[in-house]
Amino acid sequence: MYRVLKTSLLTFLLFSIVSLKTFGLSSFFLNENGIISERERINLLLEYQTIQRYLPSMREYTTTKISLKGIYPPNSNVELGFEIPYFKINEANDSGTLGDIRLSSKFSVFKELFEFIDMFIFQTTFNLKINLATGIKKEDGYRNIGLQKVLYYPLSSGYSDLEIGFSSSLVGTMFAISVCSSFISVSSKIEPPLAFNTENDNIMIGTTLELFLHYSKDFNLKIFGETTYFIPVSEKSKYQDILLIGGGLWSRFFKNGIIKIGYYKNLLEPKYLENTFNNTVIISIGVRI
């Protein structure tokens, strides 16, 4: 009886801590963690992002992305989300364009609670993401900056993509470690969805470390570091020369407010200028309702 009560108490305390520290949307840029919140509430986030890309002359130009994101966990085993992005090339004479709307979902496949010096939860999720063909197509996305051409691709491709992968997270009371991997099936003008011609595709792997600096009922603060690598399947893969390393901070304030600031730098030398970028800055604010 004592062991049952102890296990129940540990479970309650740990899941309370996990829910508190993973409150709201993912802290990360591209990676997914393996935790699904148990609370049935909608999280909405407005995100501002500047993306530094390369002209043919290797001078940088800036693409701005403003997106509305949302996540809703109907139960402790399922998480549903969306992202509606809008892009604008700052230096081009252009009013901007709607990007590819993303629908995402996570499904818990394994969850284990244990105690070793600290209390931990280990959870793995199956991740499924779909990019809808709502954005501007690559062939229509070229713009001029002076005499040089730039484009929205691959930020917006105008064709449907399918991403399938797994994430695992180990979460304690002071830190969390997550790893994720996925296969990105890219469709194009000559390849319909689910054709699985792999020459345009990528494999993505990522790791994330979170450190919990402060948490309470009204205020949470954590810092995170993230590494993401896009492995091209061929020279025609959608993403090329991208190995990102970065980090930032995430905070919850006034119980339901969320703020996130992050910076990411690409460590690889650019060879395929149309398929890569240099660095990005992210600032986002959200609310839980």
Image (tube, rainbow, N blue to C red):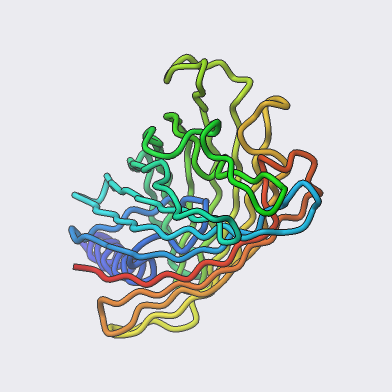
Residue at 60 percent of width and 48 percent of height: 206
Q: Is residue 220 above or below residue 112?
A: below
Q: Is residue 13 above or below residue 64?
A: below
On the rendered structure, is 144 left or right of 2?
A: right
| Residue 82 at x, y percent in the picture | 32, 48
| Residue 57 at x, y percent in the picture | 81, 51
Image quarter of residue 108: top left
On the rendered structure, is 270 left or right of 207?
A: right
| Residue 231 at x, y percent in the picture | 68, 36
> How many dots with numbers?
0
Q: Is residue 42 above or below residue 239?
A: below
Q: Is residue 137 above or below residue 243?
A: above
Image quarter of residue 59: bottom right
Q: Where the C terminus falls, by quadrant?
A: bottom left
On the rendered structure, is 208 left or right of 43?
A: right
Residue at 51 percent of width and 34 percent of height: 140
Residue at 29 percent of width and 61 percent of height: 7
On the rendered structure, is 201 left or right of 98?
A: right
| Residue 83 at x, y percent in the picture | 36, 50
Q: Where the N terminus falls, by quadrant?
A: bottom left
